[in-house]
Amino acid sequence: MKLILYKTVQHFFPEYRQWLKSMNDPRNKNMITYELPVMIWIGTLLFMLKLGARRQINYELNSHEMVNNVRVLSKEEIERIPYDGTLAYLLKRMDPQELCSLRKKMINRLIRKKCLNKYRLKGYYLVAIDGSGHLTFKEKHCDHCLKVEKDGKVLYYHHPILEAKLVLSNGIVLSIGTEFIENSSSKVAVQDCELKAFHRLAERLKKDFPQLKICLLLDGLYANKPVIDLCNKYNWKYIITFKEGSMPEVYKEYESIRKLHPENYLEYDSKGIKQEYYWAPDVLQYKETANANVLECIECEDSERKRFVWLTNFDISKDNVKEIGGGGRLRWKIENEGFNTQKNGGYDLEHAYSENIVALKNFYLLLQIAHIIGQLMEKGSLLVAEIKKSFGSIRNFAKRLLESLRTSVFDTTEIQTIHTSKFQIRLRDP
């Protein structure tokens, strides 16, 4: 199992150690015992091995074999595994932008290697943006806390986040941007919110990936003119969940235009699932804004009926209607394979790994990096073959990886072979 981890990182991110070495270390270099690559690997393994709490580093990773294996992964000399407090000390002082920069390099590497090309929609990478709860406190945690009130009484304090994730049809969701929704101080008149955070996140995405062809997948909260104008400004495509309450006048316009174009209809029937597509062009027209179209899909399976409506700036025709509708439905992957997996699949997203606000952000970003590597392993051809051969289910993956790292050391001959021989890892399709 540990060899699959090593080969996955070496295959997809051959410069990974150089990236870790190039990060700014806030500690006094004359007083440190563990170099930065060791610390980042320990923080990543905390989440990849699904330890559940920071203190488990001291127990689950405390073995002679683990020490040797971390030496191989980090290419640094160490005598023992650092304590969890040593990791927390570093993350309290490290600028979160360092880990954001590491994540950006990882994503750019995957894009340059064309690993994600076949999962694009009309040449555009699908990026779902959505907010989620991160940490919740009964008492005020810090001056940046948001609060939820009812009848003048504070129910709880919380720190939500806004995530941008590349979503692939094979179930992989890769974090490419994070905006922490927080107040600048305890004295702000109006709290921060998801829509404000969206504009900050969009600006950062454009800066980090200026040439990337992006199609945003958004929920109904973002069906408004400022968001559409921003997408057009950045030359991004968008597919936005469209509900009557979002833009009532535009929704009425869609219903009127649809009646005028009965020819804009297509029906599919496959494996007992019937889909009916309707679409209307130019439902949203501003002098300074490119026109937007509406696509509707009604899906019937047995006695269950589902209806989906999207606002999009893709031109819609009978040739692409099903493809665009399929792209719009991938937005749910940020909820299921993204947030739900990170909350309930062992990553413990909602666990407070520190009380320090800077450390909390860095732990969150380490979780995202661990999730990227973990997914590339889980969906990679190496692990698929291993599952069939030895342990039968992906549910046992983290447990087997921990067992492998704790109880046996890397074979130096195999490591040398990895660096001298070519090998390939293919991402598994659904």
Image (cartoon, rainbow, N blue to C red):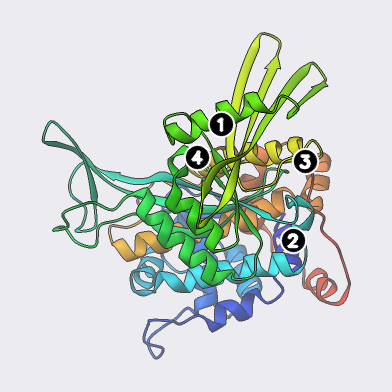
List x then y, in percent, for residue 398: 62, 47
Give the answer, above or below, for where 169 lies relative to 376. above
How dense is the environment of label 3, judged by Cα within 10 Å: few (below 14), some, or many (20 and up)? Answer: few
Q: Earlier in the sequence, mark 2 or mark 3?
A: 2
Q: Earlier in the sequence, mark 1 or mark 4?
A: 4
Where disc 1 sits, the SS reads: helix
Q: Residue 254, labelled with which disc?
A: 1
Q: Tell whether 6 sits left or right of 49.
A: right
Q: Residue at x 33, y 69 (%)?
A: 92
Real-space Cα distance between discs 2 and 3? 42 Å
Give the answer, above or below, for where 413 lies relative to 292. below
For mark 4, what is the residue? 219
Whether the residues at callouts 4 and 3 have beta carbons within 8 Å, the answer is no
Residue furthest to the left in view is: 152
Real-space Cα distance between discs 1 and 4? 18 Å
Give the answer, above or below, for where 124 lies relative to 388. below
For mark 2, what is the residue? 3
Q: Earlier in the sequence, mark 4 or mark 3?
A: 4
For mark 3, what is the residue? 320
How dense is the environment of label 1, judged by Cα within 10 Å: few (below 14), some, or many (20 and up)? Answer: many
Real-space Cα distance between discs 2 and 4? 40 Å
Question: Which quarter of the figure is the N terminus placed in?
Answer: bottom right
